Image (cartoon, rainbow, N blue to C red):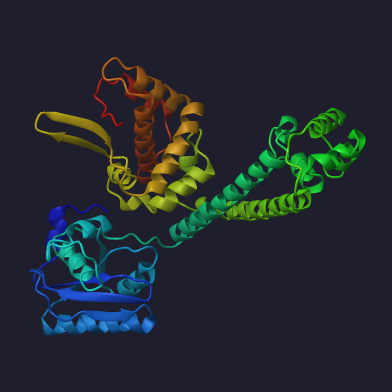
Amino acid sequence: MKYNQNFKISQITDNTLVIGVDIAKKKHYARAFDYRGIELDKVFTFKATSSGFESFIQWSEDIAKRHGKKKITVGIEPTGHYWYTFGQAVMDKGLMLVQVNPYHVKRSKELDDNTPSKSDYKDPKTIAFLVKDGRYQIPYMPEGKYADLRKANNLREEWVQKIIIVKNKITRWLDIHFPEFLNVFSSWEGKTALMTLEKIALPEEIAQQTAKQILCLWRQEVKRGVGIKKAEKLLIEAKSSVGIREGAQIAEYEIKLLIREYMEIRKVLDDIESVLEKTVLTIPGADHFLEIKGVGIKTVAGFFAEVGDIRRFTSAKQIIKLAGLNLRQNSSGQHKGKTTITKRGRSRLRAMLFRAILPITATNEVFNKLHHYNISQKEKPMKKMQSLISLCCRLIRIVYSLITKGQRFDPERLLKDIHRNHEVPVAA
């Protein structure tokens, strides 16, 4: 949800105990203050264990009782994944948990002692002071199907990175030992190409075969799509290969290991994507999102994994800001700086939207017309990149309306915007 600065400040009253906690892997540090910034107790350290969390809760409640505080607000600086367990423990006890921006902590830590030094005793105070001044955000912890979806999508991203690494290694191996291989096969990921690399990868091994022998090898698993001409072409390329021949024995062992690893990762990735697809179809409104031509199941899964329950937002602008696609302008006096997007917020959401808008613009007639309109309008035509960013924001607004209002995607309604004479903000 969206909280403006005045609302955030109004949540910190004279009845509020503000606690800043510096999160680490094994031990956390906490300091307690009132709404004016007066410290109410000594620095408290506790371990990242259930007993440590219980001691923190007890310490907080004791201070609140001694000083007549009715509300406890705990502020943290999100440090990797270490805050998850502590945050859950705090919220389970009914305390208000808020987060401060690590960038703000870094910039404001010099206000007290005029030094950029960092310590476990200093940071909790900086965090608490940012909270009392209303410079915080309330973290969103996805629950139920949204938590499952985020976990599944994160898992998929990890395994995608793994398969990319293996693909690069196989491509490197081919460049060194058999650079002509892709003159025969359009991709080494095809079934026939993988079988060849697994059985007879080295050019000198292939050169010892006949075209019929190679074809017989392929026909063991591939019945259609390969013939004697492809086998003859592979034979020709192998005999004239410029690949490195030294260390052939280990090179052959290496490619077999890489192919085995690729096949195993591919299988795991297919399983994860199957689970992801089943999970995303349980999300309310996902079916409406998929009705947009060019939008695939991975795009929908990535969107909801990052955004969570879209109904918690009061406007599409908040999601645009969450993705870091909102505009900023650098200007001072008579100087007018370039307008760009902020790139703050969830970088994975922003990257996913941009990757998605490219095929959508190419295959969806409505988005294609909007794109051409943006770059060819008479007044203030956009550059291609600016138009794509604008369409990313448009996609967010469409999805928000589809889900929150229960509407179906209407291409004709979207095309009416082309004929309206209005000024569109431009982002670089």
Image quarter where the N terminus lies is bottom left
Regarding residue 65, the answer to whether it shows in the image is: yes
Depth check: 32 or 299 in front? 32
Would you place residue 257 above or below residue 230 in this image?
below
Q: Residue at x 74, y 49 (%)?
A: 251
Q: Residue at 74% x, 34% y: name it.
A: 242
Say whether residue 96 is left or right of residue 282: left
In the image as oriented, which residue stretches furthest toward the front? 246
Judging depth in this view, the residue of 23 and 293 nearest the camera is 23
Residue in front for this viewpoint, 346 or 235: 235
Question: Percent position (x, y) of residue 57?
Answer: 27, 80
Looking at the image, can residue 189 be seen?
Answer: no
Q: In the rendered view, tell whether residue 305 sits above or below residue 188.
A: below
Residue drawn at the location 32% of the way across and 49% of the way down? 345
Asked which quadrant contains residue 3, the reply is bottom left
Q: Position of residue 349 (x, y in %)?
A: 40, 46
Residue 351 image point, x, y percent: 42, 42
Rendering quarter of residue 424: top left
Residue 425 position, x and y percent, is 26, 29
For the point 80% across and 34% down, which residue is it?
Answer: 238
